Image: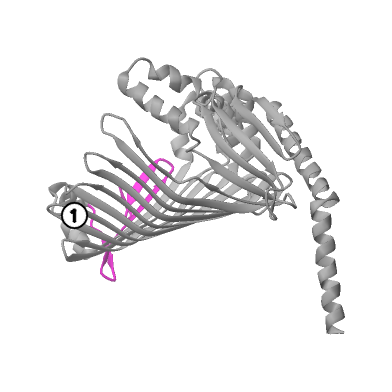
Amino acid sequence: MGKKLGYGIAGLILIALLYYFTSGSTQIVERAKAQLDAELATLEQNGFVIKERRDDAQKDHFIIRFDDPEKIAVFFTKQGNPATPEDIAVLKGLEIGADVDYLKDLYAALSIDLYPVQLPDGIIQEAGNDPENKAVLAKVEEMFRKKKLLMHIDIAKDLKHFKGRFKDINETFPTKEPVTLHTKGLTFSGELDQERIAQIDQQLDFLSLDDTQGMSVTLQNLVSHYVKTGATLYDMKSSYHLSQLTISKQDLFESIIKDVDANTTQKVTNGLLQTTIQSQAKQVKISTDTEQLLLHTVRWDAMMDNIDIKALEALQQLDPETEEKAFNQQLKSLLSKGLALKISDFSIKEINQDGATLGGIGMKASLTLDNQVDFSQIEQNPMLLINALDAQSTLRISDKLFALITQDPRAMMFAMMIPPKEKQGMKIYNLTFSKGQTTVNGMPL
């Protein structure tokens, strides 16, 4: 019985392989080709030019050119990446080459290599006849020819999953102070839903920028995650982790930020967007040849609410100088929904200066705009907008840090005029701004 079952399973595997390598593979290629044709047609309708198309049974090649900034900006915005024609104008003339393989391995229906082949027109023009610019331009064009700037993507046979990587870079650019760029281990994977990215995970193992004068920027282990959570392009959650960022200049200074985490959530309800961010750096170290400052557990938690999506999208497409009336109208719409900002925690748990412990500092704040504000009156007198603002904040400072700050005569004078409240070893200031009036710890300014 067991031997017969084994023969049966082997037979099923053989049939599956035969299907894959014959009619099954043909159907997969046809689906993949149809999908690619549809995507290229969409690009052509939205400001891109597809050129040098070469298509055969198992391979495809084409070049994508950025041609019409206005159409491309609208297209990117609809895809969830807001852009203006001015943003895209700097990319006009950029050309991206693509080499496509069908059924290159057991995972992929399509395997695509994307690589730049032509710089934007504006960059070429700006280079002019300056020797340094021309040398850098020649270096970049050499990298293009050798496909040193390359992204590889594999799209799974279900056309719903993908993975990929960027080619590692280790290149020196011939600027006045030659700069070396080094990247390693930039990979990604994700899921597609109705031809849009529904989830993507990315990782960068290492990135550095170094010049010959000792300036260095190094980034280690950056990991990010994004997932679409609702019906709109704005409904999403994302998270980031960075193990270490180092910025230094020979023996002059060094700044090290360790273990940075950030989580962002966006949610749309009845056309209004709420976005929240929670972030933390475990340690920030700043050193010079004479002193050292250590910050432990730096937090930044904030929320913005009641953002009118339609007004925001419209503002991103309008020029306030040439389309002033339309711009002002959309700005009114954006501000009339009760826009609110809340900083729930901006704090440093512990500050250490040259070995001395100074304690911590923290702030909470909120800012709201009255949604009943009469914009017809504000047009006549913009200063009336101040009366529509309501703000509150609380600042907490450790006793040791407060003593250090008040060594400045100006800070000491302020502390004498408006004494802080005291609670659990902290000096506290409560600031309120309402109807154009400001008070600190109940005392008007």
Depth check: 312 or 126 in front? 126
| Residue tagged 1 | 405
Amino acid type, mark 1? Ile
Residue visible at 84% across and 74% down in the picture: 7
- The x and y percentages for residue 415 are 20, 54
Q: Is residue 425 magenta?
A: yes
Can the viewer see residue 27 in this picture?
Answer: yes
Q: Is residue 381 magenta?
A: no
Q: Is residue 89 above or below residue 303?
A: above
Identify the image quadrant of residue 46.
top right
Identify the image quadrant of residue 347.
bottom left
- The x and y percentages for residue 353 are 18, 60
Q: Which residues are magenta?
A: 418-445
- The x and y percentages for residue 366 are 45, 51
Question: Which image quadrant: the C terminus?
Answer: top left
Identify the image quadrant of residue 72.
top right
Depth check: 220 or 328 in front? 220
